[in-house]
Image (spheres, grey):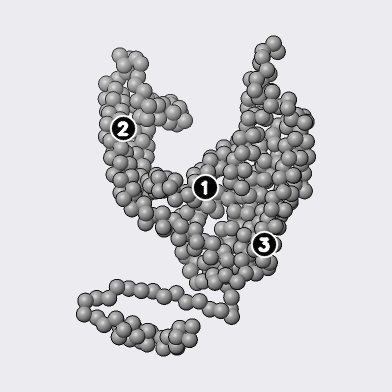
Amino acid sequence: AGVWSLFLLVLESWIVGADVRAPARELKPVHSDMSMHDAIADLLPDPAGLVGDIKVAAAFIGAKGLVDVVHELLQFAGSVKIGRPLDYICDPGNVFDLVRGCMLMALFFDSKSPTIRVAVILICWMRLLEIFTSAENVALALLPLKRLGRALVPALTMTLVAFLCFTHVFHYVWGHGHKWDATFYQSFATLITTELPTDPWDRSYLELIVTYGSVLFFSVFMLNIFIGVIGTTYEQEQERVPQTFLHHRACCCLNFLLRARVLPCALCSRLVANLVTFSTLAIMAYVQVLGVTRGVYGMLSRIIFVVGFLVMLLMAYQTPGVRWAPNENHKSYLWLTTPLQDGEDQASCLCGNLLAEDAAFCSRCGQR
């Protein structure tokens, strides 16, 4: 679904184009050669249905965002069910996933907002990397890069404080009549892009000292800090990437099991679940084809996408008879093993610890 959402966005941007480019299209000479954009638009059965935007793309992505939010709520409910709700709340990744799903779902309510559109495009491209991490060879190369963000937090914090400090100084040096937005723009150009004054002879000595000093600080000191932190952290992450990959896989399995604690897992067989999934995909694809080529779109399309995603979500958990599925009649137990200390007897240590903790638990385990 993530790849298909990105495909719809690219299709919309390529064929339809953004509304902000409308004046440029009006200024295009009539005698100019037909572009690839126009050629593809002419091949469609009904180009008039593509005026403005492909609304079915917003409906599909919005429905995907709604199901993502449901996914997160199910995971939280599973954490509550096992008595560990704080594990979900205290994980910043879960909060980020929830906000990301809400941003995608916002297309349901305002598909014309440039802010929402830009955020959705960024989210869809970021998810493309998450899909690639499913393959071990690709994940071993991408996971160290993804984990660099946390190591850069101290350096980014220091950079932000220094930037705000110099911006405040520039606002005073450049004159109290300067607006803050103009000061921010000029300060960013000076500190980040090292844009020096073109007329230094007309500037005061204080302004020149502050300008050149801040540029040297950012270009020499801060840049070297970033390069050093990135290089050191990347080498450390590469050394422990096998453990990181196993942790990533384990987290995915844990999230699946938490949702399985809430969802019913024995409504139908795996074969029936696959048939229902493929049938739902076919219906959703047919609705998208009608929306793209004929402009057929309405509230019914949104309902079909939402129901279709929810059905496929439910069918993904239909695995009756597996050991991990919740079943009150067949309880499972988790065994924890620890290395023995020197001089300890293996049998006496194991039995003594089990009997001391819970004799009834030990007897039940023996029966199994």
The residue positioned 43% from the left and 47% from the top of the image is 137
Task: State if disc 2 and disc 1 touch (CB < 8 Å).
Answer: no
Q: Is residue 57 left or right of residue 210?
A: right
Q: Secondary structure at mark 3?
A: helix
Separation of disc 2 and disc 3 at Cα? 61 Å
Give the foreground label among 1 and 2. 1
| Residue where numbered disc 1 is placed | 131
Residue 292 visible in the displayed image: yes
Q: Is residue 213 left or right of residue 101?
A: left
Residue 218 is labelled as 2
Residue 156: percent from the left, percent from the top?
A: 36, 42
Q: Nearer the viewer, residue 36 or 135?
A: 135
The residue positioned 42% from the left and 45% from the top of the image is 142
Residue type, label 2: Phe
Q: Is residue 294 above or below residue 305?
A: above
Residue 67: percent from the left, percent from the top?
A: 63, 54
Q: Earlier in the sequence, mark 3 or mark 1?
A: 1
Q: Nearer the viewer, residue 284 or 123?
A: 284
Q: Nearer the viewer, residue 366 or 303?
A: 366
The residue positioned 30% from the left and 30% from the top of the image is 219
Q: Secondary structure at mark 2?
A: helix
Q: Secondary structure at mark 1?
A: helix
Residue type, label 3: Leu
Q: Is residue 141 left or right of residue 13?
A: left
Q: Residues within 10 Å of mark 1 (few under 14, many from 20)?
A: few
Give the foreground label among 3 and 1. 3
Separation of disc 3 and disc 1 at Cα? 25 Å
Residue 109 visible in the displayed image: no
| Residue where numbered disc 3 is placed | 271
